[in-house]
Image: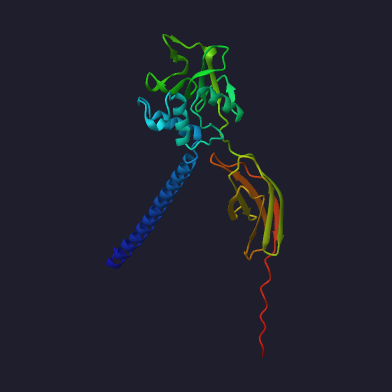
Amino acid sequence: MCTFCEHFVILVIGIEERNMLKKIVKIIFVLILGITIIQFNIKKIEAKTLVQDKMVSIAMKEKGSRYKKKYGPAPWCTAFVNWSARKAKVSTKVIPNVTNSTTMYKQLLKKGAKVVKKPKKGDIVFYKKSSRSQTMIHTALMTGSKMSIHGNYSHKVSYIKATDYRVGKGKVSKSRIVYVRPNYPKAPKKPQLSSAIISKNKISLSWKKVNQASSYTIYMKNSNNKIVYQKVVKSSLSKYSFIYDNRKYGTYSLSIKANNQVGSSSSSNIKKIEYVPPMPKKEFYQI
């Protein structure tokens, strides 16, 4: 083979190798980007930890601790539950700011809590003075269906089975144990979009407010189901208007979701609008 041909072959192979290297770099970049997006979405999901999970986590970190002033006044079993709730930013509308077991039990029920037979994480366990009594002698926080974390039990924060709680030498009978599920916040229900009206480039929405919403998110999508407008508004609002200055004709879909610290509702019903961009102003020139 001539020298020129050899150089030409080497050049072609070099170009092919560079092209292959570029493709490999692109693939690696896409994989890294995909992993980053997945990690970001996981972090977003983790950010929506339930308040009862936070409360239990806070209480468990105190396991083995002796009495501390930060817990509240002694006797401190109810004060410890209360302290854990406040640290987790549980509203006093859910768990009242009291340090007496009987008072907490009664106020929880007034605030929508329910007595349950099968406890779970975040429930509060009460121990009655006797089977027929409504006077509570001790309070603790359930960490699951069986285990519980107690303030002021054996003079410390103790982690035991709820049914292993003792008064004197014997265990408390099951008839003296009451499990209460506080009225923790839930993801709001789906809102109802009442109207969507367009006037020139101004779009106006109205909806029916739902309970337990801390905000609403408005979505507008084009015919390709791509979000072209998104806005979070206050929970006090039931209507909102905005200016849309896109230059593309088309049919757009509007919907709304309700949000709170737990998560978001499913999407509302959809209202469609026909968007016609405003005509540009005519300019006149004097000749």
Q: Position of residue 283 (x, y in %)?
A: 66, 80
Instruction: State the image quarter where residue 72 is shown.
Output: top left
Quarter of the picture holding the C terminus: bottom right
**Rendered view: 94 above or below 9:** above
**Rendered view: 171 above or below 264:** above
Instruction: State the image quarter where residue 268 is shown.
Output: top right
Q: Position of residue 57 (x, y in %)?
A: 43, 31
Q: Position of residue 164 (x, y in %)?
A: 44, 14
Q: Position of residue 46 (x, y in %)?
A: 47, 39
**Rendered view: 96 above or below 8:** above
* 144 lies left or right of 230: left
Of the pair 201 and 31, the residue shown nearer to us: 201
Of the pair 280 and 27, the residue shown nearer to us: 280
User: Extreme left residue here?
Assistant: 3
Q: Please give the name of the residue rendered at 59% of the width and 25% of the height, measured from the top-left corner.
A: 114
Instruction: State the image quarter where residue 64 is shown.
Output: top left
Residue 51 appears in view = yes
Q: Please give the name of the residue rendered at 45% of the width and 43% of the height, measured from the top-left corner.
A: 43
User: Extreme top residue here?
Assistant: 169
Q: How is the image coloured?
A: rainbow
Q: Please give the name of the residue rendered at 36% of the width and 55% of the height, measured from the top-left corner.
A: 21
Q: How many numbered marks have been drawn onto this rendered protein structure? A: 0
Quarter of the picture holding the N terminus: bottom left
Of the pair 80 and 263, the residue shown nearer to us: 80
User: Extreme front residue here?
Assistant: 73
Residue 224 appears in view = no
